[in-house]
Structures are given as structure tokens and as C-alpha cells.
Amino acid sequence: MSIPIDQFKHVMRQWISGVSIVTMQSAEHRHGLTVSGFLGVSLEPPLVLISIGQELTSAAVLKDSAAYVVNFLREDQHELSNRFAGRLGEVDRFAGLNTHQAVTGAPILDDCLAWLDCRVVSTQVVGDHTLYIGEVMAAGVNGSGKPLLYWNADYRQIDNA
Ligand SMILES: Cc1cc2nc3c(=O)[nH]c(=O)nc-3n(C[C@H](O)[C@H](O)[C@H](O)COP(=O)(O)O)c2cc1C
């Protein structure tokens, strides 16, 4: 028998991660959500994966878009993270943001720290999430800066780099 969910959450909070906004463009919708469930998985070919809740709107849009951009957030972009996580209510998540279109058609956030434009090459339903493996078709770093971190259920900054 596996461990209780509260124990799982309690332990997982001790793991630190970066914070990204994953964006996508289907025939009808531009959409995005905050994601820390991201991993680089292969160098040749360059592959990454994101883990997305099966019941989310984002999962439906991803099914149609078959592509996504992972936008790494800067250390001062926690408001953006909250907005794309739905913590500010039903707002236009892209309001006031400058974007440009990636090779795959998904929007790149111009002010993010770095980005990866990915074509979905494989999906795997795992528990209540779906893993989307993406082949990286284009990528870039926007100048210098430090990434936003997430640890123990809150945003953190690197203070010694
Ligand atoms: C720091 C942070 C990290 C998150 N990471 C993920 C993630 O990896 N996968 C996921 O499905 N949801 C994640 N979420 C939650 C989604 O961003 C949130 O449920 C969002 O509102 C989903 O949007 P949608 O319902 O429009 O698809 C995260 C939220 C926060 C604040």
C-alpha cells in the first residue's frame, strides 16, 4: 500500500524546482499554465517532458496544439506564476505580456529568462497526470538573470549566485 497523500505532499515540498509557464496555441485557443513539473530527458535528440493534470483545460488545449513552449521565469516573476496558476481568478493570463510566435506556433513570452519550443512526440498517462515528451525545435536565453525557485510551497530566490 502506498503512502497517504498528505505525507507525500509533506515530503515533496522539500524538493526545490524552477518555475515555468508552459504556453500553447491550438486552432482556437492561446493558453498557458504555471508548471514546475518539467525535466530535461535526452540530449540526442533534445527531449524534455512536462507533467500536466489530466483534468485541466491545458490538457485539452495540448491535445489539439501538439506543441508547447516552456518559458523559464525570472526571479521577480512570481506574480506571473500566480496568474497562470489561476490564483488571481478568471483573468486574461496574457494581458500586458509581449509575445512572439515560436516555430511550432505557440507563444513565447518575450520577458522570460529562457525558452524551449517543443513538438509533442509522445504522451503517457500516469496516475492523474499526463506526461508530454517534447522534441525541442528551437530555444533561446534572453540575456542574463536568475531563475525563480519554488520550495516548501513558496517562491524563493537564489541569494548567492
Ligand atoms: C509553482 C506552481 C507549479 C505548478 N506546477 C504544475 C505542474 O507541473 N503541472 C500541473 O498540471 N499543474 C501545475 N500547477 C498548477 C497549474 O498551474 C494550475 O492548476 C493552473 O490553473 C492550470 O490551468 P488550466 O486549468 O487553465 O489548465 C502549478 C502551480 C504552481 C503555483
Image (cartoon, rainbow, N blue to C red):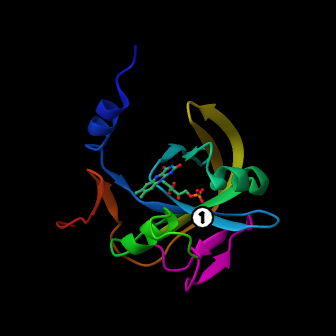
- Left or right: residue 114 versus residue 76 is right
| Secondary structure mostly taken by the magenta-highlighted segment of the chain | loop
Residue depicted at 44% across the width and 53% down the height? 36
Residue depicted at 28% across the width and 53% down the height? 151
Quadrant of the snapshot with the C terminus: bottom left
Where is residue 80, by image quadrant? bottom left
Residue depicted at 18% across the width and 67% down the height? 159
- Residue 55 % position (x, y): 62, 45
- Residue 134 % position (x, y): 64, 49
> In the image, is residue 87 above or below residue 150?
below
* Residue found farthest to the front: 89
Towards the viewer: 27 or 18: 27
Where is residue 156, by image quadrant? bottom left
**Label 1 Cα neighbours within 10 Å, binned few <14 / some 14-19 / many ≥20:** many
Q: Is residue 79 visible?
A: yes
- Residue 101 % position (x, y): 70, 75
Q: Which residues are magenta?
A: 92-112
**SS for callout 1:** strand
- Residue 146 % position (x, y): 33, 70
Quadrant of the snapshot with the N terminus: top left
Residue at disc 1, CB closer than 8 Å to ligand 1: yes
- Left or right: residue 27 versus residue 119 is right
* Residue found farthest to the top: 1
> In the image, is residue 112 above or below residue 51?
below
Q: Is residue 103 magenta?
A: yes
Residue depicted at 34% across the width and 76% down the height? 76
Towards the viewer: 110 or 155: 155
Mark 1 sits on what residue? Answer: 32
Q: Amino acid at mark 1?
A: Gly
